[in-house]
Image (cartoon, rainbow, N blue to C red):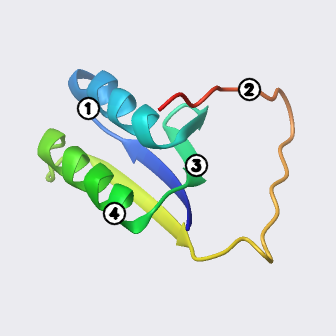
Amino acid sequence: MFVILTYDVGKKRVSRILKICRRYLVHVQNSVFEGHITEAKLNSLKNEIERQIEKQADSVCIYRFENTKYASKEQIGYVTIHENII
């Protein structure tokens, strides 16, 4: 499946969430990640994030797409190429 993950967390937790997300997905913008991931890895990602965030103050959104047949991406402005090394 393909996912887009966004987060808005407290300053103290940003670096921890960033490191977790980089292990699973491609970092495309500040606080935005995307990529293909298995259900098992997505569950691992969510479990790691849940252990780090404060649920009353932080927000993480995950958009799931079972396939990308009808999806397209358009980016306007500067495009940063990020390597995703797992």
- The location of residue 77, given as percent across then percent down, is 86, 32
**CA–CA distance in space, label 1 to label 4:** 27 Å
Instruction: Residue under label 2, please give it.
Output: 81
The residue located at (80%, 77%) in the rendering is 70
The residue located at (21%, 22%) in the rendering is 12
**CA–CA distance in space, label 1 to label 2:** 26 Å
Instruction: Residue under label 4, please give it.
Output: 40
Instruction: Residue under label 3, please give it.
Output: 34
Q: Which mark is residue 10?
A: 1
5 over 22 or under it: above or below: below
Which sits earlier in the primary sequence, circle 3 or circle 4? 3
Q: Amino acid at mark 2?
A: Ile
- The location of residue 21, given as percent across then percent down, is 40, 38
**CA–CA distance in space, label 1 to label 3:** 21 Å
- The location of residue 64, given as percent across then percent down, is 52, 69
How would you rate the neighbour count of disc 2 (Cα within 10 Å): few for under 14, some for 14-19, many for 20 or more? few
Q: Report helix, strand or loop for mark 2.
A: loop
**CA–CA distance in space, label 2 to label 3:** 13 Å
Q: Quadrant of the N terminus?
A: bottom right
Q: Amino acid at mark 4?
A: Ala
Q: Amino acid at mark 1?
A: Gly
Q: Which mark is residue 51?
A: none
Which sits earlier in the primary sequence, circle 2 or circle 3? 3
Which sits earlier in the primary sequence, circle 1 or circle 2? 1
39 over 22 or under it: above or below: below
